[in-house]
Amino acid sequence: MSSGDFDGYGGRHVPEPLEEPLEGLADAYDEIGTSDEFQADLRSLLEEFAGRPTPLYYASNLSERYGAEIYLKREDLLHGGAHKINNALGQALLAKRAGKDRLIAETGAGQHGTATAMVGALLGLETEIYMGKKDVQR
Amino acid sequence: MNVFRMRLMGAEVNEMTRGGEGLADAVDAALEDFAQNVEDTHYLVGSVVGPDPFPRMVRDFQSVIGREAREQFVDRTGELPDAAVACVGGGSNAIGLFHAFRDDPVDFYGAEGGGEGSDSSRHAAPLASGADDVIHGMKTRVIDEDVEVHSVSAGLDYPGVGPEHAMFRAVGRCEYSGVTDDAALAAFRELSETEGIIPALESSHGLARAIQLAEETDHERILVNLSGRGDKDMETAAEKFDL
Ligand SMILES: Cc1ncc(COP(=O)(O)O)c(C=O)c1O
């Protein structure tokens, strides 16, 4: 099973020029991204920059109303206001270690773009965001 | 507000006027940029989508959510939840929550952007209603061609979904359904009023599904990923609610 395979889903269906850079990224992730040093640096940033751990909140009023215990994992309390920062920090740190100096990202609601802009500023990487006009307006 | 925030932090923001002017078009543009600038550029994909290694790499980075939540849940209740619930756009907050529970007897529920209904012609629910296809470098589930991609929340407004979710669906590990715009808006308002927490419209889809489960199933302990806050959604909400 190749590592990008999820029971026949996934894979790498890209034009030929993208094959090699993606292979390079996969190698960088497997080597650098899983190392103890990288993981320790990421953990510090997740705690000190992003605000982890986030609380687990028991929503007592809602629970009482519906007769089941409802618990909320409060990713809304993270820096930037969404879970997107967990991933942005990880990838940006990896990109920096792999010698890249520019980040690009797509965004829908703008949350991922915001997270990318935050980590770009933090790590001193040039950052460019693509966002649909429909989403810019709403 | 988000565009201004990004610019304030020094990022350049490109407005895309092509295609449906939405998330899928932004991905296309970013992929093109990446192909032209691979030497110095990293494409920071925002969800568990795209070609390998993105789906597994983003999953690993988001799995901190479930690792923390599992430990906190057991510390607090002495048990595991019966169900874990999350909204699914590309699927990163959902996979991030689920991953630590994947070998546990915990039922998974994914709430997609049901738009006007996942059997209507305007939704963003490729798992509840779609077919196998290739999009943005991955084989996965994609909405049907005659469906216009639509969700009240921009973050769920995407025609595909992460391949690991397509696998979870195929093997029956997670149950996926579309939550309509109206149901999500109702949950958005309900959490605001009952708990004093304004959720993101995306997250409100997961909440709406959790409320349904509380009403309709015998799940006693339900864990929901509140993936984001609703500040960015004030204008959309103000248009919908007459307050
Ligand atoms: C708060 C929030 N939740 C969920 C999503 C959807 O993304 P995913 O399905 O990858 O978690 C977004 C995307 O913009 C978001 O901002």
Image (cartoon, coloured by chain):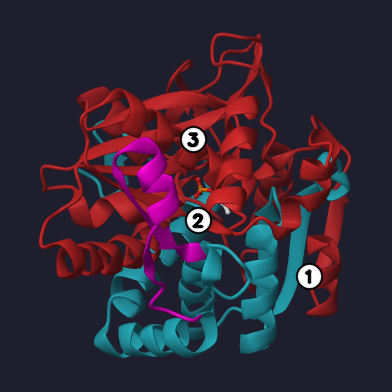
Quarter of the image where one finds residue B14 = bottom right
Asked whether residue A13 appears in the rendered view, the answer is no
Q: Which residue is mark 3?
A: B208
Name the foreground residue: B6 vs B109.
B109
Q: Which chain is home to disc 2?
A: B
Vertically, is B101 above or below B153? Answer: below
Range covered by the magenta-colored residues: A51-75
Distance Cα–Cα, label 3 vs label 1: 30 Å
Is the C-beta of the residue carrying label 2 under 8 Å from the nearest atom of ligand 1?
yes
Q: Earlier in the sequence, mark 3 or mark 1?
A: 1
Q: Earlier in the sequence, mark 2 or mark 1?
A: 1
Distance Cα–Cα, label 2 vs label 1: 20 Å
- The C terminus of chain B lies in which quarter of the figure? top right
Q: Colour of chain B?
A: red
Pointer 2 and pointer 3 on the same chain: yes
Q: Which residue is mark 1?
A: B6
Instruction: Answer whether residue A72 is magenta in the image.
Output: yes
Q: Amino acid at mark 2?
A: Ser
- Secondary structure of residue under mark 1: helix
In this rendering, position of residue A29 left or right of residue B174: right
Vertically, is B151 above or below A76? Answer: above
Report x, y in % for residue B97: 33, 54
Asked whether the residues under the numbered discs 2 and 1 touch, taking CB atoms below 8 Å apart as contact, a structural biologist would say: no
Residue located 74% across and 56% down the image: B232
Q: How many marks?
A: 3
Please rate how many residues cluster around mark 1, counting C-alpha atoms within 10 Å: few if below 14, some from 14 to 19, many from 20: many
Residue located 49% across and 27% down the image: B134
Report x, y in % for residue A40: 32, 89
Vertically, is B62 above or below A40? Answer: above
Q: Which residue is mark 2?
A: B227
Q: Colour of chain A?
A: cyan
